[in-house]
Image (cartoon, rainbow, N blue to C red):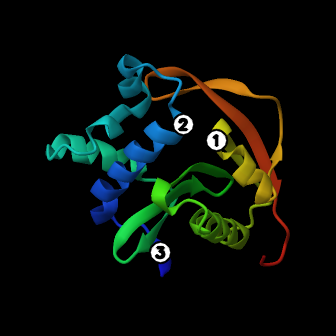
Amino acid sequence: MITVRDYKETDAQAVGRLIASTYSTFNLGFASPEELGLFLGPFRYADSPDRAHQEAIAQVVRSEMVFVAEDQDAIVGVLRGRIDRLASLFVAGDHHRQGIGRQLVERFEQECRQRKATVIRVAATEYAVGFYLAMGYKRSTGLRSGWSFEGHGLPFQPMRKVLSAGPH
């Protein structure tokens, strides 16, 4: 059974590993092996026991709102954001198409509504556009090229969703 809960600092290493794995696999296929570390930033050190690496990961994960999805005590999804922006969403590849991303986004949208947000924006990777369209997000411009940490040339689709007043 999947449980969605607030992130805790003790989740940082597991979240770092999840992000490093899913980001590399589903979003960074265009990057050369030399470029991959630039796009991953501190997540390139997700398996490192070095405290400085782990603190750098924890610092990047910190956000106004962070939720994790657990499956039998293993973190299989994470969403980071603030009141008007969904910053990132990652779900373990072997847990795709099980409603985990939907649960995380619905929790985030509910929290945004409670904080009186009216619109949520997201810079969706090409891989995630279909998911966000299914969640009611709309493309707001054409495909763009952006950056991730020191890596440049990450294709993304700006999207937005107008929130309804009531719960979904």
Q: Nearer the viewer, mark 3 or mark 2?
A: 2
Q: CA distance from mark 1 to mark 3?
A: 25 Å
Q: Nearer the viewer, residue 126 or 119?
A: 126
The answer for how far apart the CA atoms under marks 3 and 2 are is 25 Å
Residue 38 versus residue 140 in the image, above or below: above
Residue 56 locus on image (x, y percent): 29, 42
Residue drawn at x 84%, y 72% is 165
Residue visible at 39% across and 65% down in the picture:
75
Residue that mark 3 sits on: 5
Residue 27: numbered disc: 2
**Label 1 residue SS:** helix
Is residue 127 visible to the viewer in this orientation of the structure? yes
Identity of the amino acid at label 2? Asn
Q: Nearer the viewer, residue 164 or 105?
A: 105
Give the left or right position of residue 159, taking residue 44 as reference.
right
The quadrant the C terminus occupies is bottom right
- Amino acid type of the residue tagged 1 in the rendering: Tyr
Residue labelled with disc 1: 127
Using the rendered image of the protein, determine whether residue 92 is visible from the camera's viewpoint.
no
Horizontal and vertical percent position of residue 135: 76, 60
Task: Residue 47: name its quadrant.
Answer: top left
